[in-house]
Amino acid sequence: QVQLVESGGGLVQPGGSLKLSCVASGSVFTTYDMGWYRQVPGKQREMVARVTRKGTTDYADSIKGRFTISSDKARNAVYLQMNMLQPEDTSLYYCNLYQLSPVGKEFDFWGQGTQVTVSS
């Protein structure tokens, strides 16, 4: 089992910055995808940014150029630096880890969510 602990959410003014952190513990395998998703009431959960097991980085079009995802594989951690935050970025942000075991079984884990609110 994998546990994901998130931190860094809060209230900021438009144009401000926040940095989200997510640290995984437990049965984390060697290779995995890890990233951030967000969801607001009445909307589908959407991918914000992720680092894949193939070494690629994916970003949602809405945040390209403003958010940067980074990882620390030694600590099984990912970070999301969010700059130039806008009210539209207000959401509950979830950390996600997806992995395949050495025998090909899929595992998908989610954090509890951390709230980001952008308001003047």
Image (cartoon, rainbow, N blue to C red):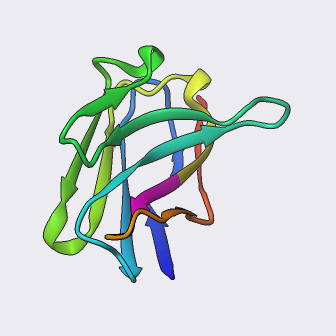
Give residue 42's position: percent from left, percent from top.
85, 31
Residue lying at 33% horizontally and 29% vertically, measured from the top left: 58
Residue lying at 30% horizontally and 72% vertically, measured from the top left: 29
**Residue furthest right as drawn:** 42
Left or right relative to 31: residue 64: right
Q: Quadrant of residue 109?
A: bottom right
Q: How many marks?
A: 0
Give residue 86's position: percent from left, percent from top.
51, 22
Task: Work out whether residue 98 or residue 37 is closer to the camera in this orientation and state it.
Answer: 98
Where the C terminus falls, by quadrant?
Answer: top right
Residue lying at 48% horizontally and 65% vertically, measured from the top left: 105
Q: Does 57 appear above or below 9?
A: above
**Span highlighted in magenta in the image:** 95-101
Give residue 23's position: percent from left, percent from top.
36, 70
Answer yes or no: is residue 29 visible: yes
Q: Quadrant of residue 101?
A: bottom left
Left or right relative to 85: residue 64: left
**Residue 27 belongs to magenta span:** no
**Residue furthest front as drawn:** 103
Answer yes or no: is residue 8 visible: no
Residue lying at 47% horizontally and 16% vertically, measured from the top left: 62
